[in-house]
Amino acid sequence: MTINLTRRQFGRTAAGIAAATTVGAPLSALAAKKLSYANAGNATTNSNTFAKAWLDEVTKRTGGDLTFQMFTGTKGGEKDLLDGVALGTIDIYNGAYTGTREFDILYSPYFFRDGNHAASVVNKLLPAKLDAVLEQRYNAKFMHVGRAGPWALFTKEKLSSFADLKGMKIRAPQIEGQIKGLEHLGAKPTVVPFNELYSALQQGVVDGMVTLASLGVTMKFYEVVKHIYTNEFGFGLDKQVMNMNSWSSLSKSEQDNLTGTFIEMEPAGYFQDTMDSMPGIWADWNKLNGEGTAVELDAAAAQTAMEPLNRSLADDVFGAGTWDKIVAEHIVPALT
């Protein structure tokens, strides 16, 4: 096979070969890009287990042109990580926090019917506004959302109903939907960064917390809080966000590979894996903290109570009539 190069192309190639030879790098490294990925949780969380599989597959499919360094639980809380994306010190962020109302209200308890409904709303009904807000606020590309499963309420003292939350100090992330949801149900939300949460529970700063249900066992929260409630208390939507300059440095095929591989793997490897793990999490919690410490409450009253708040949030942030559209949005099983 004959390859024809223009003089300019030949010059660029020769310069690249010379540079590689100078630093002792193999010629295959000329096109390689190493990107950083960061998440506030430890390496064993479902989101990070998935991320490793996803990014390893991208490396494989690009023939090593894209490689990744993963930072899990080592670079601070989620706000720190997203600020790092804005500054360009982190390429890819995975997490719940964005500090934007457009994303934050989606975490309100009972905002979605389930994870499939959440995917349909985020990826079909609201994507334009969600894309725009992250680019404007953080110079970041919103690649996709990973459905991280249900959030759960945890308390030291056992509740008999959600009405018992009245007056309790419950840890909330810096996410409007969770803060206002807890307030609406009578609790006193107390914002604590995720990386400080274990010690806050241990020291009695808060009486309980809300976070992803899947983190209860993996992060050993059973050591510092007694009861977990199996009711969904909001739904986890992990944003995959990339620094815009890093995104722009990729070729179109590399961009498509990064997002396309995620879309292909997310339904089974992110969403369904998490949902399938729930019964085991409840069983493990009962085993570790005592039978009956994984508690199911009657959620009907809480769902009814939350509807006015969720309607108000949706219509205020996305425009009048949005809540009715969200309620009417049909469910699709995949992320597409």
Image: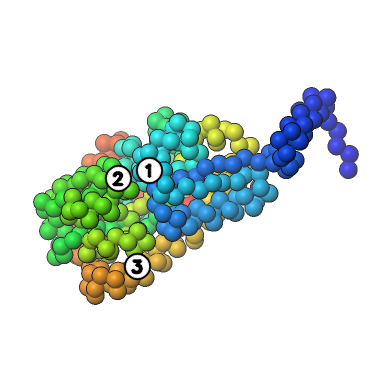
Q: Which residue is mark 1?
A: 76
Q: Which residue is mark 2?
A: 193
Q: How far is mark 2 from mark 1, CA to CA?
A: 9 Å
Locate residue 301, reporting x and y percent.
17, 59
Residue at the image position 13 percent from the left and 50 percent from the top: 186
Q: Is residue 176 above or below residue 281?
A: above
Q: Earlier in the sequence, mark 2 or mark 1?
A: 1
Q: Pick out the residue farthest to the top.
A: 8
Q: Is residue 209 above or below residue 84?
A: below
Q: Is residue 122 visible?
A: no
Q: Is residue 243 visible?
A: yes
Q: Earlier in the sequence, mark 1 or mark 3?
A: 1
Residue at the image position 73 percent from the left and 39 percent from the top: 24
Side (left or right) of 146 relative to 308: right
Front-lying residue, 70 or 124: 70
Circle 3: residue type: Ile
User: In terms of image quadrants, where is residue 81?
Assistant: top left
Mark 1: few/some/many CA within 10 Å (<14, 14-19, 20+)? some
User: In terms of image quadrants, where is residue 133?
Assistant: top left
Q: Quadrant of the N terminus?
A: top right
Q: Is residue 73 above or below residue 80?
A: below
Q: Secondary structure at mark 1?
A: loop
Locate residue 32, reporting x and y percent.
66, 41
